[in-house]
Image (cartoon, grey):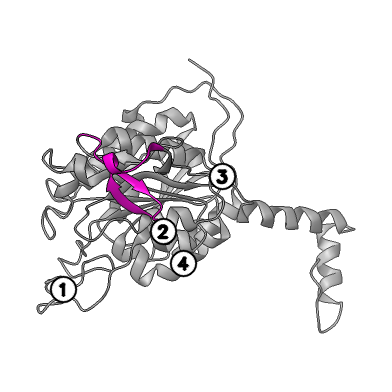
Amino acid sequence: MPEATEPTGGATATPVALKLTAKDFKSDQEVRWCPGCGDYAILAAVQSFLPELNIPRERIVFISGIGCSSRFPYYMNTYGLHSIHGRAPAIATGLAVSRPDLSIWVVTGDGDALSIGGNHLIHALRRNVNLKILLFNNRIYGLTKGQYSPTSELGKITKSTPLGSADSPFNPLSLALGAEATFVARTIDSDRRHLQSVLRAAAEHQGSAFVEIYQNCNIFNDGAFDALKEPETRDDYLIRLEHGQPIVFGSQGQFCVVRPPGGFGLAVRQTADVPAEEIVVHDATVEEPAYAFALSRLPGFALRNTPIGIFRNVTRPTYDRLVQEQVESARAKATGTPEEQLAELLHSGDTWTIL
């Protein structure tokens, strides 16, 4: 069997003989989502992709909150924790700081992450904790039977909004970019190849990787993303971002993305009407988030001009590494045994100074 390579995404391990398959990542638990749910496709894609990392299963952890997506850890033959509503990023942060050798994945939904968990999400992203956060966005509350969620469109009629929602929805990618996330991407449950390519890039990233996955809830919000999936419309609606390539899309390449003269942001134009040099060339490594933010604002709620792929992929120090360096520095300055240090601290007076 081949030796495991040095794991990516923060996990470190001594190379061992390792040859895992998708079957090795399937638990013995019965998968209990509604028949036809998009979560099945995401689960299968993750289980098939993980062997590529060459990381032992005991070095991989899936942490979730509450919601349909949060059943995920039960179905993964790795370590996992089905935690508290909205608090998965906080729990995962503690684990990342204390166990930098692990590959840690957070699985959450639009309700779990953006409502009760919104505060925890933005702080994990701004700190750049070494986590991979997968947000399943179906624009509805599925587990609690069909209430509107923070990503439901204005005017959405649900059990909790019989006259239509009066709330303006979040754009999850814009929110993540506003929190200075260093890796931001979007993909779709039914496009397995694209989904796995984004997961690979997220796994390789050092720091917070935020991936929004459009996921169909066929019971309470069926067809929410059909325009991006149906052959008649998908090519004209989807913008597939490729680093270093001009942003051109459409069934005949008839559309492109440009920077409007004298304006801000980005706009879509007819390719035939635009000089080639004016078409935006995608660069996910732009340090300032304004470019990626402008990309995230292109689509309306009708999904026309929806970019998928990696919006931003930049490098800055991770929170867990900075904390570890502080601990190492304090240890280097300390004298005496741990017991002597504790005794000195306890008897040092009414105030303590922590180095």
For marks 4 and 1 on the same chain, the one whose residue lies earlier in the sequence: 4
Residue topped by disc 3: 206
Identify residue type, mark 3.
Gln
> Which disc number belongs to residue 265?
2
Asked if the residues shown at circle 1 and circle 2 are in contact, with their CB atoms under 8 angstroms apart, the answer is no
Q: What stretch is highlighted in magenta?
A: 252-276
Residue 101 visible, this angle = yes
Q: Which quadrant holds the C terminus?
A: bottom right
Asked if the residues shown at circle 2 and circle 4 are in contact, with their CB atoms under 8 angstroms apart, the answer is no
Identify residue type, mark 2.
Gly
Q: Position of residue 138 (x, y in %)?
A: 23, 57
Taking the view exactly as shown, the residue that stands out farthest to the bottom is: 350
Identify residue type, mark 4.
His
Quarter location, residue 272: top left
Taking the view exactly as shown, the residue that stands out farthest to the top is: 1
Is 314 on the left or on the right of 322, as rendered? Answer: left
Q: Where is residue 326 in the image (x, y as percent from the top left)?
A: 74, 58
> Which disc number belongs to residue 239?
none
Identify residue type, mark 1.
Gly
